[in-house]
Image (tube, rainbow, N blue to C red):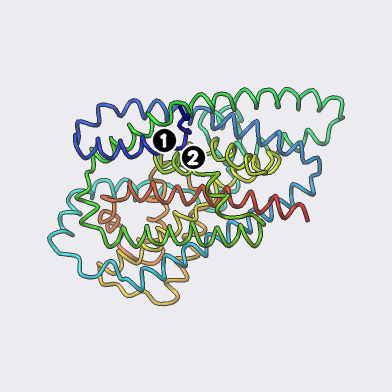
Amino acid sequence: MRKIKLHTKIFIGLVLGVVIGLVFGEKALIIEPVGTIFLRLITMIVVPLVLVSLMLGTASLGDIRKLGRIGIKTIIYFSITTMVAISIGLILANTVKPGSGLNEQVRAELYKSYESKAQVGIERMEEKPSAIDVLVNIIPTNPLKSLMEGNMLQVIFLALLFGIILTLIKKEKSEILIKFLDGLNDAIIQVVHIAMKLAPYGVLALIASVIGKYGIHILITLLKYSLVVIGGLVIYTFSINSLTLSLLGRMNPFRFFKSVKEAMIIAFSTSSSNAALPVSMECVEHIGVSRAYSSFVIPLGATINMDGTALYQGVAAVFIAQIYGIPLGIMDQITIVLMATLASVGAAGVPAAGIITLAMVLKQIGIPLEGIALILGVDRFLDMCRTTTNIVGDMACSVVIKESEKK
């Protein structure tokens, strides 16, 4: 009998999760702990994986100038693709006008249901540090605290710093540490393999609990807005990434998407770039991207690259403005592009981080922050979609950077 592949099992789990959620409603929440266990198991290894693999990848480059070159190219790539993504979102939102014609009764009901959640996002946005503070806070005062709290920017800084140091000390001493890190990295990857055996059941439980809790009625109510966001994400994910893969990465997009579908399913079901990170690194290795590149680009991307989130913010900002009848001029739209690009940098790779950054964008262009309440009903599902776009962008970038370094 032919063995069923893991990605097929995961997809079956996803479909069964939708069915169970629709059939049993809130009763499906009883199996949510299964999904939580899977998510915690994946999340548990993110920090050690990023720390060890990034140190190993940095040390293996053996050249600080090469590291700097890769870093600059990665940041430029992410910045450009993020601006392209949000531009696609703005074009679609201005063309389709999803915020026009929303029933007044539906609008009032949405406010009533989600106003308190919107307020939480607004309060968290007010606490968000300035750009200067973010830069300063990249350098940790207590490395152990950074690791325990999972502060990804600080973890990446530590990994890069110690990886560079390994290239500066005597080779006979650095080789001992590199061999240890290599063995530790293999051990962490084995944990990933064990966790992935639970993936079909974890995905089933997570999807069932989401559908059971929120249902699909709210998705139908905001169908026009949801379709614009999803349409934009599909266009960006499969057209722009295919273009960069073909032209810059010299890779067949069909081969790429076939190889990374497991990571896409994990990202979709967990709504977390961090949770999908170990699987993403494993997937790109199968298409020829060595750990020297993937261990640098993908963890960095999980922290600063939010293509899908930026696109969603563009659509959401225009949608809310249209509901309030607020006209947005060309300068307002440019401001959205710039703010969403900057706000997405350092956004936590966890579920619903986009709500906080959306609040920053809305505040900048003078749209009432309470309007966030209008979209929270479908945010969980859209979060799943935009997270998938985010991690595809990370993996595509690793292919492009690998190809550019060959030249």
Res 20 → quadrant: top left
- Amino acid marked by disc 1: Ile
In the rendered image, the vertical position of residue 186 relative to residue 323, given as above or below: above
Seen at 28% across and 35% down, the residue is 209
In the rendered image, the vertical position of residue 281 relative to residue 192, given as above or below: below
Marks 2/1 in contact by CB < 8 Å: the verdict is yes
Q: Given the current orientation, which residue lies at the most extreme bottom position?
A: 329
> Residue 205 at what x, y percent from top left?
32, 31
Element type where label 1 sits in the image? helix
Seen at 26% across and 50% down, the residue is 377
Position of residue 213 in the picture relative to residue 257 (left or right)? left
Image mark for residue 10 = 1
Instruction: Pick the quarter of the image with the N terminus.
Output: top left
Seen at 68% across and 52% down, the residue is 401
- Amino acid marked by disc 2: Glu
> Residue 106 at what x, y percent from top left?
15, 58
* Foreground of the two, 17 or 49: 17
Which of disc 1 and disc 2 is earlier in sequence? Answer: 1
Mark 1 packing: few (<14 Cα in 10 Å), some, or many (20+)? many
Q: CA distance from mark 2 to mark 1?
A: 8 Å
Position of residue 82 in the picture relative to residue 38 (left or right)? right
Q: In the rendered picture of this protein, how many numbered marks are placed on residues? A: 2
In the rendered image, the vertical position of residue 331 relative to residue 50, given as above or below: below
Question: Disc 2 marks which residue?
Answer: 262
* Foreground of the two, 236 or 272: 236
